[in-house]
Image (cartoon, helix red, strand yellow):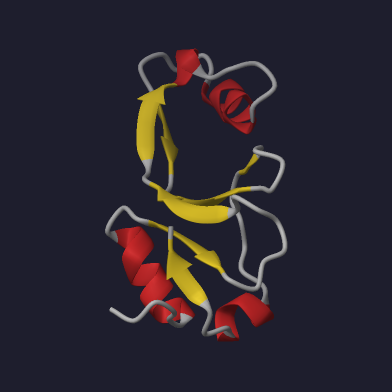
Amino acid sequence: MDDRFDFSTALRVIKRGGRVARAGWNGKGMWVALTPGSEFPAQHAKDGHASKHRAREMEPQVGHNITLLPHIDMRAADGSMVIGWLASQTDLLAEDWMTV
């Protein structure tokens, strides 16, 4: 595989469990990766998380699970994680994606 590629290739890489970044991104250490879906008991939803709101909708029904769908997350330049990253049109059309 060439050093640089388009977004469709980047998407295939992350679907296989890899991490990708754009050469054109200014921040150091930035990358995106796929977070697979998961399921957990509603009673384990953490306070302050959106899943807790979903768990409250399920009460008093005990034994139900919260389902989190797969999504793309980003490591930002400051080391924080951006949950549910969305590609811009520039990202989608760029051909400077690379595996990290």
Give the residue drawn at x 61%, y 76%. Answer: 91
Image quadrant occupied by the N terminus: bottom left
Total numbered labels placed on residues in the image: 0
Q: Is residue 60 above or below residue 67?
A: above
Give the residue drawn at x 35%, y 16%. Answer: 63
Q: Is residue 12 shown left or right of residue 48? A: left
Image quadrant occupied by the C terminus: bottom left
Q: Residue 95 in the image: x percent, y percent?
A: 52, 85
Q: Is residue 100 shown left or right of residue 56? A: left
Q: Quadrant of residue 98?
A: bottom left
Q: Residue 34 in the image: x percent, y percent?
A: 42, 52
Q: Is residue 11 above or below residue 56?
A: below
Q: Is residue 99 above or below residue 74?
A: below
Q: Quadrant of residue 57?
A: top right
Q: Is residue 25 shown left or right of residue 6? A: right
Give the residue drawn at x 57%, y 69%. Answer: 22
Q: Is residue 48 shown left or right of residue 41? A: right
Q: Residue 89 in the image: x percent, y percent?
A: 66, 80
Q: Residue 86 in the image: x percent, y percent?
A: 62, 63
Give the residue drawn at x 54%, y 55%. Answer: 31
